[in-house]
Image: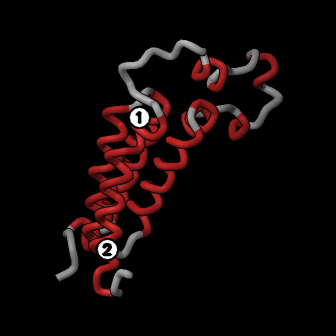
Amino acid sequence: IARAQDAPALEAALTWHLGENANYCAGEYAWVADTDGALVAAAEIPDPDEAASFLPSFLPGPSCAAAARNPSLDSSVTTLQRILMTSPDFAARCAAVQALTTVAVRSGEPFRLRCYAALRGLQRSASADPAAAAGPPA
């Protein structure tokens, strides 16, 4: 049983482990071709005449395509994004940055875009708050 003082280190280690093994567990790699057409089917945009009747939020985007293509990897990326944005532990957030970078390099397009968007969102929020960009608390 982990002690309370070991929880931040355990969270960081598990975050790193998720990033290293997410692609293997989900069977998703950038260098493997999309032979079943799942990405094309998930990201298919309706006819332009029909698209006018939809609200923009109903049009499929990278998140929808990722969830349709590989729900397991989509769940892993979502978990890493949550850790990145909400974890109070600096080491866990650093591990989430490394994990999202690893998943982005190893994954195909919808997942790569989601990882890059999460990292860009973190960069924007850190630049808006200089205290957040300074690093770990003293």
Above or below, comparing residue 114 to residue 4 in the picture: above
Q: Nearer the viewer, residue 93 or 116?
A: 93
Label 1 amino acid? Answer: Arg
Residue 3: x and y in percent read 33, 86
Q: Which residue bears the numbered disc 1?
A: 112
The image quarter containing residue 4 is bottom left
How far apart are the alpha carbons under marks 2 and 1?
A: 25 Å
Horizontal side of 57 relative to 69 (left or right) equals right
Above or below, comparing residue 67 to residue 50 in the picture: below
Above or below, comparing residue 34 to residue 106 in the picture: above
Is label 2 in a helix, a strand or a loop? loop
Residue in the image at 69% along x and 36% along y: 56
Which numbered circle lies on residue 79?
none
Residue in the image at 30% along x and 43% along y: 101
Q: Residues within 10 Å of mark 1 (few under 14, many from 20)?
A: many
* Circles 2 and 1 in contact, beta carbons < 8 Å: no
Horizontal side of 68 relative to 23 (left or right) equals right
Horizontal side of 10 relative to 37 (left or right) equals left
Residue 24: x and y in percent read 40, 37
Name the outermost residue toward the left.
138
Label 2 amino acid? Answer: Asp
Is label 1 in a helix, a strand or a loop? helix
Q: Which residue bears the numbered disc 2?
A: 89
Name the outermost residue toward the front.
1
Q: Nearer the viewer, residue 48 or 120?
A: 120
How many numbered markers are drawn?
2
Residue 73: x and y in percent read 50, 41
Q: Earlier in the sequence, mark 2 or mark 1?
A: 2
